[in-house]
């Protein structure tokens, strides 16, 4: 059976095509990933490839700065002076219990699949725990949020932590799903 559906045409602004050096005859490649779409020439010279790499690098830097500004610097839970006389933001992240715990994989809740199934929770679901000190109980439930800091690639987390960015705030921003770019 023949599929008569046609793909939608994407019209690119003429000035953007001129800036990119796209000609009418150029074949283009479309690279799609979660929350991103990149259009490149199908064939490029070495210098054209260098230009693409440079632009993507600049965009990466700009987006990282936007994320860092939204999160703010870790201030070691308002304890900027640790008594050592060092004001090193990367050290604040190391000493901040909230940020440190977010980097510690041992903090992840692991429940056997058979118990999750018994509770009606899918095996891939995000979990959260609450404690009842008086009863001496910990209750584990399916988290309401779809994303959290565990969805951030380790390389990005490392860069943010070494830069002194508050990982606890990043986690909150991810879970809140508020717009932080392009406001």
Image: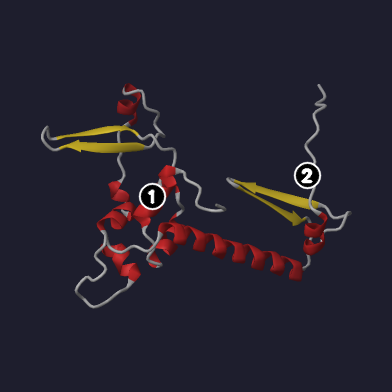
Across and down, in percent, residue 60 comes to 57, 62
Looking at this view, name the residue that lies furthest to the front.
Answer: 183
How would you rate the neighbour count of disc 2 (Cα within 10 Å): few for under 14, some for 14-19, many for 20 or more?
Answer: few
| Residue pictured at 30% horizontal, 74% vertical | 87
Across and down, in percent, residue 69 comes to 46, 61
Is residue 149 visible in this depiction of the protein? no
| Residue pictured at 32% horizontal, 73% vertical | 88
User: Could you tell whether 73 is left or right of 180 in the image?
Assistant: left
User: Could you tell whether 154 is left or right of 80 in the image?
Assistant: right
Is residue 162 visible in this depiction of the protein? yes
Q: Which mark is residue 10?
A: 2
The mark nearer the N terminus, 1 or 2, is 2
Mark 1 in CB contact with mark 2 (< 8 angstroms)? no
| Residue pictured at 24% horizontal, 65% vertical | 79
Q: Looking at the picture, tell me which residue is in the foreground, 166 or 45.
A: 166
Q: Looking at the picture, tell me which residue is in the foreground, 78 or 27.
A: 78
User: Looking at the figure, which quarter contains the N terminus?
Assistant: top right
Q: Which mark is residue 171?
A: 1
Across and down, in percent, residue 124 comes to 41, 34
Secondary structure category for the residue under label 1: helix
Measured Cα–Cα span from mark 1 to mark 2: 35 Å
Residue 6, above or below 48: above
Across and down, in percent, residue 106 comes to 28, 49
Secondary structure category for the residue under label 2: loop
């Amino acid at each position: 059976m023949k599929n008569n559906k046609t793909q939608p045409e994407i019209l690119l602004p003429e000035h953007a095509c001129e800036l990119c050096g796209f000609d009418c005859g150029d074949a283009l490649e479309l690279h799609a990933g979660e929350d991103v779409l990149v259009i490149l020439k199908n064939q490029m010279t070495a210098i054209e490839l260098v230009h693409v790499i440079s632009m993507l690098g600049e965009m990466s830097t700009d987006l990282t700065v936007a994320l860092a500004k939204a999160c703010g610097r870790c201030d070691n839970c308002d304890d900027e002076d640790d008594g050592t006389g060092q004001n090193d933001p990367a050290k604040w992240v190391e000493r901040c219990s909230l940020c440190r715990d977010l980097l510690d994989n041992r903090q992840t809740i692991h429940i056997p699949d058979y118990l999750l199934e018994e509770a009606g929770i899918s095996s891939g679901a995000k979990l959260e725990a609450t404690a009842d000190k008086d009863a001496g109980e910990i209750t584990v439930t399916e988290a309401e949020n779809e994303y959290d800091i565990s969805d951030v690639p380790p390389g990005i987390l490392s860069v943010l932590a070494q830069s002194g960015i508050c990982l606890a705030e990043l986690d909150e921003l991810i879970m809140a799903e508020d717009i932080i770019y392009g406001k």
